[in-house]
Amino acid sequence: MLEGLRFPYSAARTDHGEALLRAQLPLTLMLGSKTVQVVGLLDSGADVNVLPHSVGIELGAEWSEQAPQVRLSGNLASLEARGIIVSAAVGQLPTLRLAFAWTRSEDVPLILGQVNFFAEFDVCFFRSQGYFELRPKAPGGGT
């Protein structure tokens, strides 16, 4: 069985000042020779990974060179987005490639969703205990 990593939930506040906990994952994104340290919100209800515009710019990506356009849904449906693939590293786990919907907006967090974060990792949420565990998918694992 592959070794996993354990991460604590992060404390956050709503716009109304209410305290809550979020499953946020520190990771490193790489594109070419550029590297950016980020924190992504694990969202098992999100269809796709979402990358804020500034993070793509920090990675040296050019908006006009990214294709195809990606259609977002839900509360992000009005945002323009392009597809981009970057390398990602979490702790000492092997580096992998993640596909993102790179949006022009800065009003969205970096979101780790079904395509393709949850296709690459098994995640167990232990919210009542204040942590989550992350494990890379087993070799030959399904989608």
Image (cartoon, rainbow, N blue to C red):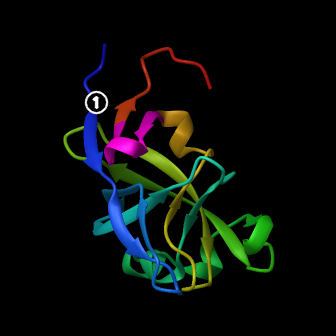
- Position of 81 with respect to 23 (left or right) is right
Q: Which residue is at 80% across, 80% downward? A: 78
Q: How crowded is mark 1: few (under 14 residues within 10 Å), some or many (20 or more)?
A: some
Nearer to us in this view, 67 or 103: 103
Q: Is residue 124 one of those drawn in magenta?
A: yes
Side of 19 where 95 appears, left or right: left
Q: Is residue 1 visible?
A: yes
**Residue nearest the viewer, comparing 65 with 27:** 27
Up the image or down, 2 lies above or below 11; here it is above
The answer to whether residue 71 is seen in the rendering is no
Q: What residue type is labelled 1?
A: Gly
Q: Main secondary structure of the magenta part?
A: strand
The span picked out in magenta is 121-133
Residue under the point 37% across and 52% down: 88
In the rendered image, residue 125, in percent from the top left (x then y), is placed at 44, 39
**Residue under the point 38% across and 30% down:** 136
Assign a secondary structure to mark 1.
loop
Task: Find residue 132 and report its horizontal and vertical position in percent.
Answer: 36, 42
Q: Residue at x 58, y 64 (%)?
A: 50
Quadrant location of the C terminus? top right
Magenta stretch holds residue 77: no
- Asked if 21 appears above or below 129 in the picture, the reply is below
Residue 36 percent across, percent down from the top left: 30, 69
Q: Position of residue 20 (x, y in %)?
A: 43, 67
In the image, is residue 95 above or below residue 52?
Answer: above
